[in-house]
Image (cartoon, rainbow, N blue to C red):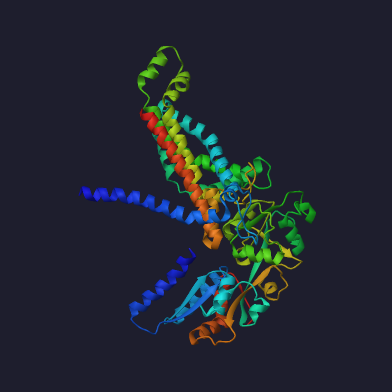
Amino acid sequence: MSMTFTVCGFIAVGFVLLITIFLVVSGTPAIAEIGFIDFIFGTKWASTAKEASYGILPFIMSSIYGTLGAIVIGVPLGILCAVFLAKVAGKKSSSLVSNAVNLMSGIPSVVYGLVGMIVIVPTVREVFDLPDGANLFSAMIVLAIMILPSVISVSETAIRAVPREYEEASLALGATKTETIFKVILPAAKSGILASVVLGIGRAIGEAMAVMMVSGNVANMPKLFGSVRFLTTAVASEMSYSSGLQRQALFSVALVLFVFILAINLVLNLVIKREKK
Amino acid sequence: MKILRAAIPMLLAAATFTSCGSATEKTVSTDGSTSMEKVIGYLSEAYMADNSDVKVTYNPTGSGSGIQAVQEGRCDIGLSSRSLKDEEKADLNETVVAIDGIAVIVNPANSVTDVTLDEIAQIYKGEITNWNELGGSDAPIVCIGREAASGTRDGFESVTGTEDSCKYAQELTSTGDVVQTVSSNPNAIGYASLASVSDSVTAVSVEGVAPTNDTILNGNYKVQRNFVLVTPKNKELSDEAQKFYDFCMSGSADEYIIKAGAVPVEK
């Protein structure tokens, strides 16, 4: 029987290896043909134009900005919510909120996109008096909401893991509850919270469907209120009818995205390791 | 994806072939325009329902590849969403099977209801940027379009002469998205197949002609393109292919063409 477990365990490893090899093999020819510098740092993407141009810097920058924006909006909200769950809320309200958070993590991304498209995009357009609301900012808001569940649940676990003595000592020394939370509990839970942030980055950078529905999808260099295309949406929106070098270039875009995810996972592992020490 | 789509009908054909054990399974192969997927899908389904011993296959490769496939004898009937070029007409026949009307749509709140082809081109190239230049309210124009590989985008850009020079605010991946976005933004302009236009948006008239089945059919409405069946000149179609071709050109094909969102031509 233990053999079965071992085989199943290695199947997972096999899939990761398979995907990695596939992406490297199918992603590198286009990079070689276009040229690494032109591909990564080129600012113009016109894959179906007569004089095709394959620069993916707009996608890379949009993905990075979008993710940063989601972190800036979503992380403070998520951490404070985690504090509420772990330290402030009574039993009833705590279970209500944590059920809601769990439900949130189960909502399919296309639903987030749909709500974003129908509610957030028009609202952003009206509030900021823009000609069009489908832009980087709308994508940031949708992503911020989408990363909340992972940020909240991991941070909450980290906060609950802080020894009770720290809190009691702080309170005994005359600190208020707020001071205790911000100066004792949160610093003590620092690395767990950091892990939740990295997890959120991973979720945000890999999201395609919801982003595609609210960001406008034009391959511009990112502007807060401009239409943008992310790495993920670049692949998703063109793959179905692509051919030739365009198709290969899309594989290369996927490879770049994969490298990003890999880097984020490495950072996550480092953070977790440091916490264990 | 393309390989997969091509492979599935083949596999299915192979599967039915073996399961029946009959060697009389006949196939008609079509190859070409991705924009004609719906039209040819409805037609072949209807045809196969009546002729269960015939398999009509469709390989979505794009108009250019489809035309080439007929020239090289790799398929029976080629599908093209553009008319043949003169050099292609040397050894190929073209027959218009249906017409695809592309409606230019704006928000119902927009007071602009008529534009010229030239104005459309200028709007999408970013030369006209405010609705007041067209007699509308003082508001910026938001150009909504489709993703680069879309057949509708290809058709729209070639009719308006804006290939590769459009400055889009949004490139959406489906007709439904375009309609939804235009209906929720009073400043937006977009384009979509006439059949998918709903009450939530207004289809403007182009050069004074409103898009209807009649104006598309008689050519007065300009933003349209032909769906063409391409056949070889020097070689007769196989019996089965000829029968399918005749079906597509018969009056009984009209209802399926309409279902697929295109306008049937006079037969």
**Residue B26 occupies quadrant:** bottom left
Q: Which image quadrant: the C terminus of chain B? A: bottom right
Identified at 71% across, 67% down, the residue is B210
Compared to residue A1, the image places residue A70 above or below, namely above
Left or right: B233, with A264 as reference point = right
Identified at 46% across, 41% down, the residue is A263
Residue B125 pos. (x, y %): 72, 56
Left or right: B257, with B141 as reference point = left
Number of residue marks:
0
Residue A131 pos. (x, y %): 69, 47
Tell me, yes or no, if residue A97 can be seen here. no
Front residue of this view, candidates A169 and A112: A169
Residue reaching furthest top?
A: A173
Front residue of this view, candidates B253 and A43: A43
Tell me, yes or no, if residue A197 can be seen here. yes
Front residue of this view, candidates B36 and A48: A48
Residue A187 pos. (x, y %): 45, 23
